[in-house]
Amino acid sequence: MTRLSRLLVGTAALLLALLYVLPLWHVRLVAPQYPEGLGMHIHIASVQGATETDLNNINNLNHYIGMQRIESDAIPELKIMPWLVGALVAGGLLVAAVAKRRMLYAWTGGFAVLGVAGLVDFWRWEYDYGHNLDLEAAIIKIPGMSYQPPLIGSKQLLNFTATSWPASGGIAAGLAFALGVVAVVLTVRARRAERSPCIPAPAAPTMPTADPLFARTA
Amino acid sequence: MTTPKHLRTLLLGAATCAAAGLAFYACSATTGGANLASGDAASKVYVPPGQYDQYYAFLSGGYNGQIGVYGLPSGRLLKFVSVFSQNPETGWGYNEETKPMLQTSFGSIPWDDTHHPELSQTDGVPDGRWLFINANNTPRVARVDLTTFETTEILQIPNSAGGHASPFTTPDTKYIVSATRFSVPMHNADVAISSYKQNFKGTVSFIRADQPGRMDIAFQILMPGYNYDLGHAGKGPSDGWFFFTTYNTEQAYEKLELNASQNDKDFMAAVNYRAAEQCIAQGKGKSVPADYFHNVVDEKSHQARSERKTSVTTLDPTACPGVVYFLPTPKSPHGVDVDPSGEYMVAGGKLATVIPVHSFTKMQKAIADKAFDGEEYGIPVLKYGATIAGEVQKPGLGPLHTEFDGKGNAYTSMFISSEIVKWKLGTWEVLDRMPVYYSVGHLMIPGGDSKKPWGQYVLSLNKITKDRYLPTGPELSQSAQLIDISGNKMKMLLDFPTIGEPHYAQALPAELIRNKQVKFYRLAENSHPSVVKAESEGGITRSGKRVDIKMAAIRSHFAPDNLEGVQLGDTVYFHVTNIEQDWDIVHGFAVQGAENAELIMAPGATRTLKWVPKATGVYPFYCTDFCSALHQEMQGYVRVSPAGSNVALMANVSRKAQAQMASAAANRKDDSHEQHKPAGKER
């Protein structure tokens, strides 16, 4: 592992530690009657309203469609996630400290698996909230309508436009993962260079020259 | 050939036609002439949908007893603030929480007459904390909190009648004042009206106002039995002084119209309130019995409580020389307005042919030089020539009030000639005139009575509207007219009818209060004794003939919504809490046959309606404020059975309440379970 790779992994681990403070994901709901919007921040250990009353107000509105109340206590993953993130942070720091190539690969791979699993799990919860409605309590029933918010992007749910994006912590985590990948690439390259010192590293590919026509219209 | 008779008829006919034509022409010419709005006026007052006005303007509601809040320059009505009059629309003065606000030593009074809104100030500039307003009929002053636009405090003024010169503030809002317009015998004494000169007194009250919830009369200065009309505090060099106009120095007690208009000059009273404070501190004041009320809304419980007060400190100015001086001022002066620099005191001598302006510097010198012209009731009268800085010649007819633009100009309202006159401080020359429609009383420049006016507009507050709007029978609205004063010439921009009679008004830039608005009351902080903070806390209880129903209101239901066990002869109290914590989600509550009004509950607030059913039956109640898509379903029933019936007390339980109860029970189980776990576990 190069010095740079170690630095990158160490930084990645510290970035991941930000998840204890910063929200992972953000869901925003805007409707004609809610120009100021309602928002939800998903942290690794809790679901919180963007303001102290937002989550309760979202839940109150959701009673019209029979949606279950969104409450941190009802989502067991929120109890596990801080440990998983903690393990990733510790692992990253360990990799940076001991500088073992294979550990780096394992760490980055583990990170990728956990990330994908997390997104799948998030989608699954969204699916559950959106489809598993208490139709007996629901006041507004539209045949075939589901209320699953998007994982990423915008979707119209009755009068609300729901928009979902990674929040600051999510971006930090993405960045951490990218740093991990770069560390892996650098490590792999350095290893190749070590094994075949005679072959010069390929020149960086040059950008294709811009099409003058395109340049004009752009 | 036509006979002379025919000719006469013809001529008469032609003349009639011509006269009619002329009249028609004249008529349309008048209307056209009265449309003085300049070409680009529309764009100057147009606030596009979704955008905000520049200024909040607070216009007194006059004999509706309330306050109208408007946006300027659009003139759009934003809110009607209930103050001294019951308001069935909001339940103000009808619900149990606010009834104490209208309590006085005369009992509960459902109405009054508001005249002068006054913004609190810091260093002589409106600061957007509070708005004060006076009640003219049963003298009181009120505080309106500008984070909620709700009246939070009302103080009655004893030994006073006609609380007109009120509630003008000192530059630091330490005091607001209230002077009696009608002199009266002190302590409600029963005396012959003809003993006016011996027994009738005026009072000038200084009310401590800088501590919300704790307004109190610091002291009352006993004044000769004149009529005290209006007042304004000094500022800058004249800080520490307060100026009041007087009329009826003739001390007439009948046919005042004539008898109080005899003297060429009445007085402006200059009161050195810092000197008065010192005299009080030296023990020269006298605590006398008095009977008055102080009513305050508790911030957390939303309930008002009344306190009866039994004494007030009075100060006889003859026992404290240097506290009051009289400045002769022509003639039956109405307003007294102090310019932004604090040097000039402009009097609106409503029967005078000039606008007299007193100089504070000259007044100080006259006092030092003892340039007295005798004294009245032991109060020195300064020589007219010794205090006058100048007179505005031929200003128009009936000058009443003056406001300032902060650029060296003054604007005076002319009631009789129905115009606003712009003139220059120092040279006293008239610069411009603007006809207003009709009979302007006060006028208002945002901050125009303060140290730093925002001199962009003047608002003319008119008493008579005659032909200005589509006619609505014999009673027409009063009006306000917005005039642009940013240039050399005044430009008429807008004309709008007002809700109630706007005597005076105040305005300030919107950004001073816009961003500190309360959006809802925190339910967690609601300390109302009958609050419910969750649907499961609702219910019905009986105590003798009194039945209390606690109810939650939340989109789109009441919990509980079915009630039984009420009996004829019971007095029922519905305590309804809006448990929403969301902006502008207001619920109402009305029950058939209630002899008072509805309830309107702001989010997080509790309101109580008293209901005495008069017959057995089942009565619906419902939400009156269209709150949500299922608002029409937001209703319930209360059953009233005969006295002595064995129908049990019953309040049904909502689905959500059931869930809450189940979860609470589970938590209790958890908790008791957890007590057996080893200590040290963090949750």
Image: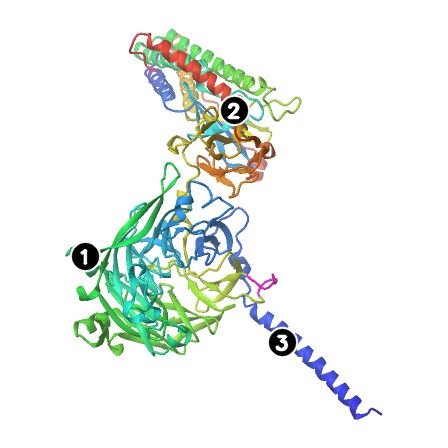
Comparing B548 with B632, the one in front is B548
Provide residue B352's location: percent of width, then percent of height: 38, 77
Nearer to us: label 1 or label 3: 1
What chain is tagged by disc 2? B
Nearer to us: label 2 or label 3: 2
Marks 1 and 3 sit apart, C-alpha to C-alpha, by 64 Å
Provide residue B89's location: percent of width, then percent of height: 51, 46
Above or below residue B30? Residue B529 is above
Which residue is the site of mark 2? Answer: B650
Examine the image and state in which quarter residue B115 appears: bottom left
In the rendered structure, which amino acid carries the disc numbered 3? Ala
Q: Are marks 1 and 3 on the same chain?
A: yes
- Identify the mark nearer the N-term, 1 or 3: 3
What chain is tagged by disc 1? B
Q: Is residue B535 visible?
A: yes
Label 2 crowd (10 A; few <14 / some 14-19 / many >=20): some
